Amino acid sequence: MGDVSANMITAEMLREACETVRCSPMDVIKTPLIPWCQTTLPPHTSCNIHIKMENMQRTGSFKIRGVANQFGRRLKGDHFVTMSSGNYGKAFAFACKHYGFKGKVVMLENAPISRSELIKSLGVEVERVPTTQLMDVVNRCVQEDGMTFLHSIDDPDLIAGHSSLAFEILDVVPYPDVVVVCCGGGGLLSGVAAAIKLSGCKDTKIYGVEPEGACTMYKSFIEKKPVGMDAKSIALGLAPPFAGTLAYQLCQRYVEKIVLVSDEEIKSAVSTLYKAGLVVEPSGTAAFTAIINDKIPDIHQKNVVVILSGGNIGKDELNNFPD
């Protein structure tokens, strides 16, 4: 990361990234933004809610946005390594296959086997390791094997690519009152928040949502510095071992508050969405979970945007959720 700071993330940089993502040969989808009232979800009449459907994104999550900008802006070398619990790894593998590069994903050993098998099917090597060994293995790959490391959380090109999602929101809802975003390491939350605030929506309140057992950004806000923890949650995509340094700086600057939801609340939300015909993984439901459990303050009669960030969940995983 070097000396990268929040000050270098400008409106111009984010708009350039948005154009890179829009024109990417990986065909990133401009996903729908659907009014809640046009779904079969249980009525929520206290405010006007729009749902951003990143679960319909190519590769199944928003992660392809950041990957498209990373690969589009710095194609140096031909053998890349990253670390991921699944969704970033899938987008990374998709990009490697598209560009004809070699790749390796260092994955948490508790990630679903189905996700590592999917990544391997795209031609990318997977090494499953304990959380405490993630960076050691990545560093070995860089130093001994000459691979180029692409960060899955804390990279300015990645964060800028994720911000393309925010510009799509503003095309439909130019001045949202509240935007609710899931948060793991903070890449999506920081990119969306920066783009919205730097686009002139100074009064928009942006909330991040984390699982109680994987609340690195929440703890970072309390300690006023990025921290790590032994993160454990059913929402594996929101359970990295640390909050990103650049992501934390941007969240501190542009995010109103981090709120927490329980694993039981997340499980119930996955089922609620599924009954409405929306297949969303636990990590992708966090923002929705916060809304239906009244965790977001002051939204009565407000224009609210909620992001469903991913839909990569297999039939075997869905069996673990209540009817």
Image: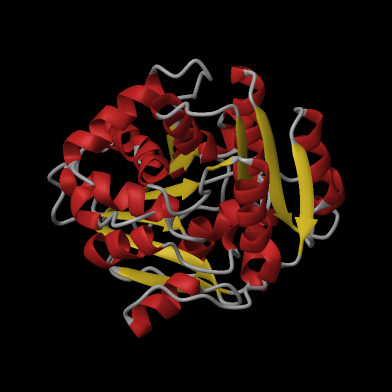
> In the image, 235: left or right of 71?
right
> In the image, 134: left or right of 149?
right
Percent across and percent down for residue 174 are 21, 38
Percent across and percent down for residue 113 are 85, 49
**Residue furthest front as drawn:** 144
Residue 235 visible (yes or no): no
Percent across and percent down for residue 255 are 29, 63
Residue closer to the observer: 302 or 198: 198
Give above or below for 159 relative to 5: above
> In the image, 181: left or right of 102?
left
How many numbered badges does the structure rendering display? Answer: 0
> In the image, 30: left or right of 254?
right
Please state, as top left, top right, bottom left or bottom right, where the N terminus lies in the image. bottom left
Please state, as top left, top right, bottom left or bottom right, where the C terminus lies in the image. bottom right
Percent across and percent down for residue 55 are 58, 39
Residue at screen point 49% across, 73% down: 216
Give above or below for 138 relative to 69: below
Give above or below for 213 relative to 4: below
Residue at screen point 27% across, 67% down: 252
For residue 34, which quarter of the picture? top left
Residue closer to the observer: 108 or 196: 108
Residue at screen point 79% across, 55% down: 128
Residue at screen point 35% across, 77% down: 225
